[in-house]
Image (cartoon, grey):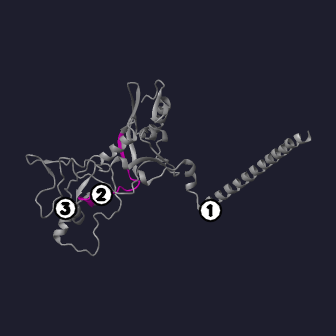
Amino acid sequence: MDYGGCEYLVPCGKDKYISKNELLLHLKTYNIYYEGQNLQLRHREEEGELIVEGLLNISWGLRRPIRLQMQDDNQRIRPPPSSSSWHSGCNLGAHGLVLKPSTLPDIQVTDVDATMNAEGTGSSTGAARLQPEEPPQLLRTRSDVGVRHRGSARTPSEQRRIRRHRFSINGHFYNHKTSVFTPAYGSVTNVRINSTMTTPQVLKLLLNKFKIENSAEEFALYIVHTSGEKQKLRATDYPLIARILQGPCEQVSKVFLMEKDQVEEVTYDVAQYIKFEMPVLRSFIQKLEEEEDREVKKLMRKYSILRLMIEQRLEEISEGPARL
């Protein structure tokens, strides 16, 4: 891979630029770190513009549930099969052909009945399991959605009705009617982007990948360091360029998807004190107060001397005409 070429500036945000050669040096380090992995990035030039493209890892940092789209504009997902229904829950074409569902291409949806039967009787030796190629991981956290409370006995008909509206994503059940979901904090997904895509474009691409109905305006991308520093990516920033400049190691920093109103930025100066214990922080405050007192006394002495000098000079001026 060629990392050379003529020198020019590459935009990395509003009024922020980096030289092409410097960016290519960062890119070379990035690709060496991920050598042999699918996270390596490629670059090309189109009409004199350097374009870098590849996969960007994004960690889920949401505190509130998100809403999953359960149907397309012109197509509806039918409920999974039960003992009281004869259809299979698949989408049927005009001639009765079974079509693959197109509404959740990136989320594994399984039938509750099939899951319960598989757990109860065990998988047979001749059963074949269909698994999509490299499905994105969207692990959910524990919630009250779809949870049965103890002490509330249900009739068989009620149980069948509930099973019709319960689906599973990666083994975690949620309600088909409400379709609310909270990804596990810190779990990682990725999107294929390029260096010309801004933060809002990357957000929309990620939400569309998982058919999330929430508006992209509710979220933001943050670069979170292990030190505690949190830097929000602006609307004019380019996340892939930012990731390259931060370096490839996710033990040092990660890109997080978070709610705008739930997270505050933490500067480097503040972050370096976050992990200290309270006694240490109190000692810092005490030393700062002592230093402040010394500076105040020093300034008071300085201006007291200046005041005396000004008063003496005023007396000399006032005494001059009187002598004459």
Q: Is residue 103 above or below residue 166?
A: above
Residue beneath the point at 47% across and 23% down: 6
Examine the rendering and report whether any part of residue 134 can be seen. Answer: no
Quarter of the image with the N terminus in it: top left
Left or right: 265 in relation to 111: right
First along the sequence among labels 1 and 3: 3
Q: Residue 266 versus residue 228: which sits nearer the camera? A: 266
* Span colored in magenta: 174-192
Q: Residue 148 in the image: state x and y as whole percent.
A: 27, 69
Q: Residue at the spot x=45%, y=29% of the render?
A: 3
Residue underneath mark 2: 180
Whichever of callouts 1 and 2 sits on the residue coming sooner in the sequence is: 2
> 317 or 165: which is nearer to us?
317
* Mark 3, residue position: 164
Hey, what amino acid is under mark 2? Val
Position in image of residue 191 (x %, y %): 35, 43
> In x, y percent, where is residue 224?
47, 49
The answer to whether residue 137 is seen in the rendering is yes
Which residue carries the number 1 mark? 279
Check if residue 115 falls in the magenta segment. no
The answer to whether the residue labelled 2 contacts the one labelled 3, judged by CB atoms less than 8 Å apart, is no
